[in-house]
């Protein structure tokens, strides 16, 4: 009998985490690597949140908490949904977890039966497809194009929905493309969803506060979709709190309660200290996130200026998050000495080894001809990285 289950044997390692691991290993060998692979803010958590966590330790918040989170935290999240997103979620429709990652995985697990279809606009965030697979679901991809800013249209959606479609899962602002759906675009998609009441929409809004259009629209605001939308958010990105592990969701009560049942059997709840800090973070006007957003926007502009100078890269204009997702197809089929570039995986590896810059291949995001570059790094590092990338790409013929 095999030691490991078929379920885990079929699961791929997270490509983002794998690339971060490879870059750390090279750094440990003494190589200089600029890490533009992992999507995590390079800022420190704001001081007022750190202070709240220290106080929570001193106040002995050290016991198991209720599974969905402390009662006052759930009330504050309900207030936050109303204040920032004009969404109405009662505290008993809210569940806090160890990151948005768990919130999404858990929602899929409570919704999907074997063979149920999940519609994913591609490019999609790496973990979505693997989470669907782990939950027994089947991915149906809707491909998008760089010239449409990687966004799907109502007719694309309409044509992929079948009787087996159970979930539509997307992020806006999007990882890996940085695209942002406007209110008008979501309202148009919303008209299609209204015709398919069996479809649940999981709206991943983890990059809510890193939106350069400054207009974040939550699809759950469309009144007619009230019973169809699960809104996922967290503190990792906007508040620079990736390691604290805090995500949450608002969902129709039956789905929220199912998530609580599942969480009660696997992780119980997220950390008590993190929960107390989250109360302080979310109570305050999100204005504290604006400075970081402004810096990300300046870096986005810098990256566009630098990368547009590389003539064989086709670049998109991200409107949020902190990734740029260039089309690298003109480099595929080229070589340098004995290194042949047959895919974006090869190109990403070549940039790691030759330029000392880590990126992530688009393959894991469902877009073979792209690479993802995170610009959550200092201007100095970004300038150096782009210079090195340019120099390495120039060697390919
Ligand atoms: N969704 C997207 C689109 C992400 O990029 C991430 C990044 N980790 C997550 C969810 C998960 O975030 P976390 O678990 O750190 O809250
Ligand atoms: N979301 C980040 C990324 O896409 C963090 C890594 C991860 O959670 O997979 O790089």
Image (cartoon, rainbow, N blue to C red):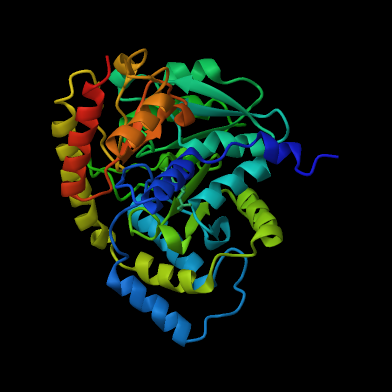
Residue reaching furthest to the right: 1
Query: Which image quarter holds the N terminus?
Result: top right
Left-right relation of 29 to 33: right
- Residue 371: image location, x then y, percent: 36, 29
Depth check: 325 or 291 in front? 325
**Quarter holding ligand 2:** top left
Residue reaching furthest to the front: 337
Tell me the residue at 48%/74% (across/down): 273
Depth check: 23 or 249 in front? 23
Q: Quadrant of residue 112?
A: top right
Query: Which image quarter holds the C terminus?
Result: top left
- Residue 295: image location, x then y, percent: 19, 51
Left-right relation of 34 to 159: left
The answer to whether residue 17 is visible is yes
Q: Quadrant of residue 181?
A: top left
- Residue 207: image location, x then y, percent: 36, 47
Tell me the residue at 49%/36% (across/down): 126
The answer to whether residue 201 is visible is no
Count of numbered labels shown in the rendering: 0
Tell me the residue at 52%/23% (across/down): 141
Q: Quadrant of residue 22?
A: top left
Tell me the residue at 21%/35% (across/down): 388
Depth check: 3 or 32 in front? 32
Above or below residue 180? Residue 164 is: above
- Residue 382: image location, x then y, percent: 20, 43
């Amino acid at each position: 009998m095999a030691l490991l289950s078929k379920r885990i044997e079929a699961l791929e390692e997270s490509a983002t985490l794998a690339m971060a691991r490879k870059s750390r290993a090279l750094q440990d060998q003494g190589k200089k690597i600029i890490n533009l692979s992992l999507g995590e803010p390079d800022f420190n958590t704001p001081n007022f949140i750190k202070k709240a966590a220290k106080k929570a330790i001193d106040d002995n918040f050290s016991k198991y908490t209720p599974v969905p989170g402390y009662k006052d935290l759930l009330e504050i999240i309900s207030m936050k949904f109303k204040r920032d997103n004009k969404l109405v979620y009662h505290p008993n429709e809210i569940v806090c977890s160890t990151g948005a990652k768990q919130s999404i995985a858990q929602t899929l697990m409570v919704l999907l039966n074997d063979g149920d279809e999940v519609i994913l606009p591609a490019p999609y965030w790496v973990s979505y497809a693997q989470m669907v697979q782990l939950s027994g679901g089947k991915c149906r991809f809707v491909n998008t194009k760089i010239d449409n800013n990687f966004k799907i249209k109502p007719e694309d959606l309409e044509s992929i929905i079948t009787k087996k479609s159970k979930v539509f899962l997307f992020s806006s602002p999007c990882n890996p493309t940085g695209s942002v759906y406007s209110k008008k675009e979501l309202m148009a998609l919303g008209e299609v969803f209204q015709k398919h009441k069996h479809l649940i929409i999981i709206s991943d809004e983890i990059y809510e506060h890193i939106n350069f259009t400054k207009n974040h629209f939550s699809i759950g605001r469309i009144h007619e979709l009230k019973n169809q939308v699960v809104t996922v958010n967290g503190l990792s990105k906007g508040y620079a709190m990736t390691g604290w592990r805090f995500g949450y969701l608002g969902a129709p009560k039956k789905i929220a309660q199912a998530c609580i049942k599942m969480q009660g059997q696997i992780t119980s709840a997220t950390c008590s200290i993190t929960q107390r800090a989250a109360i302080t973070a979310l109570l305050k006007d999100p204005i504290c996130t604006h400075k970081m957003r402004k810096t990300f926007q300046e870096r986005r502009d810098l990256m566009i200026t630098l990368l547009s100078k590389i003539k064989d890269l086709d670049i998109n204009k991200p409107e949020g998050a902190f990734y740029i997702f260039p089309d690298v197809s003109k480099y595929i089929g080229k070589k340098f000495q004995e290194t042949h570039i047959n895919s974006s995986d090869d190109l990403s590896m070549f940039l790691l080894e030759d330029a000392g810059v880590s990126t992530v291949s688009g393959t894991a995001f469902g877009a073979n001809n792209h690479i993802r570059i995170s610009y959550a790094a200092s201007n100095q590092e970004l300038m150096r990285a782009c210079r090195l990338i340019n120099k390495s790409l120039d060697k390919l013929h």
